[in-house]
Image: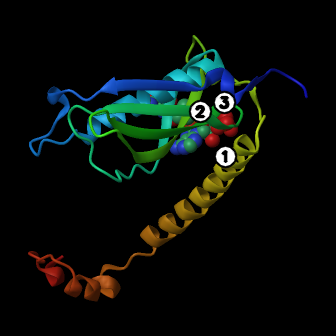
Amino acid sequence: MEGHFRTVNYSRTTITELMIPAYANFGGKIHGGIILSLMDKVAYACASKHAGNYCVTASIDTVDFLKPIEVGEMVSLLASINHVGKSSMVVGIKVVAEDFKKGTIKHTNTSFFTMVAKDDEGKLTEVPGLILETREDVRRFLEAIKRKEIKKTYKTELDNAKTNLEIEDEFYKLEKERCQVDWNLKAE
Ligand SMILES: CC(C)(COP(=O)(O)OP(=O)(O)OC[C@H]1O[C@@H](n2cnc3c(N)ncnc32)[C@H](O)[C@@H]1OP(=O)(O)O)[C@@H](O)C(=O)NCCC(=O)NCCS
């Protein structure tokens, strides 16, 4: 192995925070934005520890809120490096919410943040390689490669679909949708 390498454990990070009433929305549940902000924080902490440098968030791969989080629950965000490229790192984040009174723990979401390391001048900088010590580390690394491949195909397909979109050809699809077209197509 050439170059500098670090284990997954070296940068494994957990943030735990109590959900206070100020974090709630009008329905009494925790705002999604509060959780997103905590996820960005833990991704930054984990990535910058692995990189030994300042990092920026390049992308977030899917955030599905599986279950609502209540005021009074203790939310933990468990983050670890799943994959490294040259200057980028994929941080996998699992969010769980614990209710001490009921003694329950629920998994509320899992997301993948791509963080990119920069040096003091703001230039991209190479990050250490990753030492995979367990079967789980290997599985996560391989899954991250798959996710990147699928994202690339998806992006190409979406770009093609947008380029080839003909409004007149697809207009019939709106009949089944809950929308009203309030402009004169022929006049355009
Ligand atoms: C993300 C960013 C650093 C990429 O810079 P760039 O000049 O386009 O650099 P490159 O194309 O060479 O990509 C650098 C690395 O980032 C990765 N990357 C860039 N855009 C990405 C994206 N949208 N998703 C995932 N990875 C991405 C590349 O794959 C590459 O990885 P590698 O070095 O491991 O091979 C740049 O776009 C940026 O600074 N964006 C703003 C980030 C920011 O401010 N975030 C906070 C938002 S509030």
Instruction: Tell me whether the residue at label 1 lies in contact with that at label 3, contact meaning CB atoms closer than 8 angstroms.
Output: no
The image shows residue 57 at horizontal and vertical percentages of 48, 32
Residue placed under numbered mark 1 in the picture: 140
Tag 3 secondary structure:
loop
Q: Residue at x 34, y 87 (%)?
A: 169
Classify residue 140 as left or right of residue 114: right
Quarter of the figure with residue 48: top right
The image shows residue 87 at horizontal and vertical percentages of 66, 30
Residue farthest to the top, as pictured: 120
Q: Nearer the viewer, mark 1 or mark 3?
A: 1
Question: Who comes first in sequence, dot 1 or dot 3?
Answer: 3
Quarter of the figure with residue 136: top right
Residue placed under numbered mark 2 in the picture: 80
Determine the CA span between mark 2 and mark 1: 10 Å
Q: Foreground residue, 106 or 4? A: 106
Instruction: Tell me whether the residue at label 2 lies in contact with that at label 1, contact meaning CB atoms closer than 8 angstroms.
Output: yes
Determine the CA span between mark 2 and mark 3: 16 Å
Classify residue 130 as left or right of residue 43: right
